[in-house]
Image (cartoon, helix red, strand yellow):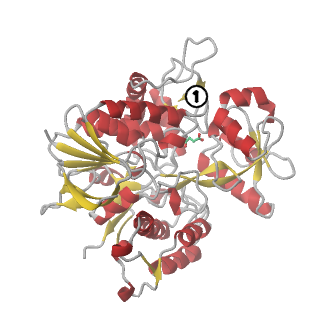
Amino acid sequence: MKKLVVIGSGIAGLVAAVEASRTHEVVLVTKSVLAESNTHYAQGGIAAVTSSDDTIGEHVADTLAAGADYCYEPAVRVLCEDGPARINDLVNFGVEFDRNPAGDDWALGLEAAHSHARILHAGGDTTGADISNALVRAVRQVAADIHEHTFVSDLVLGSAGQVIGVELIDASGKHVVECDAVILASGGAGQLYRHTTNPAVTTGDGVAAAFRAGAELADVEFYQFHPTALAVPGSFLISEAVRGEGAVLLNRRGERFMAAQHPLAELAPRDIVARGIQAEMLAQGGQPVLLDASALGGEFLTRRFPSITAATRSYGLDWGRNPIPVTPAAHYWMGGVATDIWGRTSVPGLYAVGEVACTGAHGANRLASNSLLESIVFSHRAVSVLDEPWPTETSRVRFAEQGILAEIEIEDPSARTSAQGATAVVDRVELQTLMWDNVGLARTSDLLEATRRELSRWRPAAEENRLFTDWEDANLLVLATAVTEAAIARTESRGGHYRLDYPTTNPTMAKPITIVRKAR
Ligand code: SIN
C-alpha cells in the first residue's frame, strides 16, 4: 500500500484522510487538535445546488460574477457540478443540515451575491463545527495514523524534485516521515493581519512549506476581508447570513449607505461591502458602522443564530433590540499553492486542497459559502487521482489558458540571516499591523514599497532556538513578502486587491501573477 501524508484537519484534510484510507496507508498530521481549524468556526454554511428552482448554471454565474472577471472557469464548473454529490457525502458522514419548518426539505439560506437561497447550514450558525465534529468522528473510525500537536516544518524532496517525505516537529523533537505523496490541507493565513476572523492556527504554514519546496504560488495578492466582524478584540464573525435574512448596515447617523454603492446594497459581493464600510468608517473618524438586525426580532435571532447571539450577549449587546458595531476583518485568502483542477501542484507528489490551494475557482473574490464546498470537492478529486501517473502539466494548464501577468521570483525570507543585513527578528504583532495598515483593504504604491523595505529588514529567529510560534512567524514572513510583491505588481484594482492609485479594473490584467522561490 502506498503511503500518504495528509497535513491539516479542517474539512479538506479530514475528508482526504477518510477517503484515502480506503486505498492508502494514511498519516494525518495537525498542529493543534483534530477539531481546531478554520472549518470549525464557519457559521454561514456551504453553498450547493440542492433545490429544483436553482441550477448549476446559476451557481456558476454567481461565482464568476463575485470573482471579478477573473475566475478560472473550468475550476468553477467542477466546484458547482460536483457540489451536490459532495453534500450527500457530508450527510452520509452524519452531518445534519437544518430543515425547513415543515421538515420536508433543507432550510436554505441566502448570502451576498447569490441569486438563490442555496446555503445549507447546521445548528443555525454552527455549520463548520457540526461538519468538523462529524468528520473527526469518521476519521477516528478509519485506519489513519493521527498525529496531533505536530508541526510540519518542511517537505522533503527526492533527487528528481518529487516529494518523498515531510519533516515534522513534535514533543519528541524533529523527525522525517517518508511517504509516496502529500496532500496539503493546512488552511489559510488570516494571522497575516492584525484583525482577522480566523483562529490562531491560520499561519499559512503549508503555503510557506510548498514555496520552500519550489512550488508555484498564484493569486496571493487577492485577500478577502469579511465586511462584518464584531468590533471587539478577537473580531468575532457576524455571518453574512444575517444580512441574507434582512439585517442592514447603518452609519453613525443611522443612515443606510450600501444602496448608494451597489444595486444589491448589503448583499453586494463581499469586497464591495467591505470597502463601503471602510469608506464610511473613515468618514466617521474610524468609528465602526452598525449592523441592525433588530427588525428580525430577538426570538428569531436566538433560534437562527444561536452562537452569534451568545457571543454578542457576552459583550453586553442585545442585537434583538439594538444595532451592533461591526468592522471588516481579514477572512479568506483566494491565493495559495497553484494547482490544477485535481489538486496537483507544480511539485510532483504534492497535492494542495482547500484554502491552502489556489485552483482559480474563487477568482479575485470568493463567493460566500463556496469555501467549505471547494474544500470537499477538490479534496475528493485529489484522492481520486492519487494512483494516476503524474502529468507533465499541472497548474500550468490554467496559466496556458489565462496567460500570466507576471512571474515573480523571490529569495526565501525564512532563510535570511543577520549576515544578509536583516537587522531584526520578525515580530508577529508588528508584521500583522504592517500588513493591516499597508497591504489591507486599500493599497498604494507608497504603502507597498514601504512594506517591502520593512519586511526586507526582518529575519526569522535562529533555528536552534525556535518555538512553534517562531516557525509560524518565519512562515508569516514568507507569505507577507509574497503578498506584498504580488500586490506591487498588480497595478489595477480587482476583487480583494484594491489600489487607491489604480482604482479601476484593467481588462488586460485578468491574468495570474505567480510567485516562486529564487533558486539558491
Ligand atoms: C459567513 O458566515 O459570513 C462566512 C461564510 C463564508 O466565509 O463564506
Task: Return the x and y of residue 215 as percentages of the image width and height.
Answer: 29, 60
Displayed-image quarter of ligand 1: top right
Q: As drawn, is 336 to the left or to the right of 493?
A: left
Q: Nearest the camera: 42 or 489?
A: 42
Instruction: Give the vertical position of 465 relative to 139 (above or below).
Output: below
Q: Is mark 1 within 8 Å of ligand 1?
A: no
Q: In the rendered image of this protein, does residue 454 appear above or below residue 57?
A: below
Q: Quadrant of the N terminus?
A: top left
Depth check: 334 or 66 in front?
A: 334
**Which image quadrant: the C terminus?**
bottom left
Q: Quadrant of residue 469?
A: bottom left
Measuring 43% from the left and 84% from the top, which residue is drawn there?
422
Q: Is residue 264 visible?
A: no
Q: Secondary structure at mark 1?
A: loop
* Residue drawn at (41%, 67%) of the image: 467
> Relative to 212, is 297 on the left or the right?
right
In the displayed structure, does residue 441 sit left or right of residue 286?
Answer: left
Query: How many marks are shown on the rendered structure?
Result: 1
Is residue 345 left or right of 160 when viewed as pictured? right
Q: Which residue is mark 1?
A: 123
Tell me if I can see residue 517 in this picture.
Answer: yes
Q: Residue furthest front?
A: 172
Residue density around tag 1, few if under 14, some if 14–19, many if 20 or more, within 10 Å? some
Work out whether residue 170 or residue 122 is closer to the camera in this orientation and state it: 170
- Spot occupied by residue 342 in the image (x, y as percentages of width and height): 29, 42
Q: Position of residue 59 (x, y in %)?
A: 49, 32
The residue type indicated by label 1 comes to Gly
How far across and how far down the image is residue 41, in percent? Answer: 54, 42
Q: In which quadrant of the rendered view does residue 42 lie?
A: top right
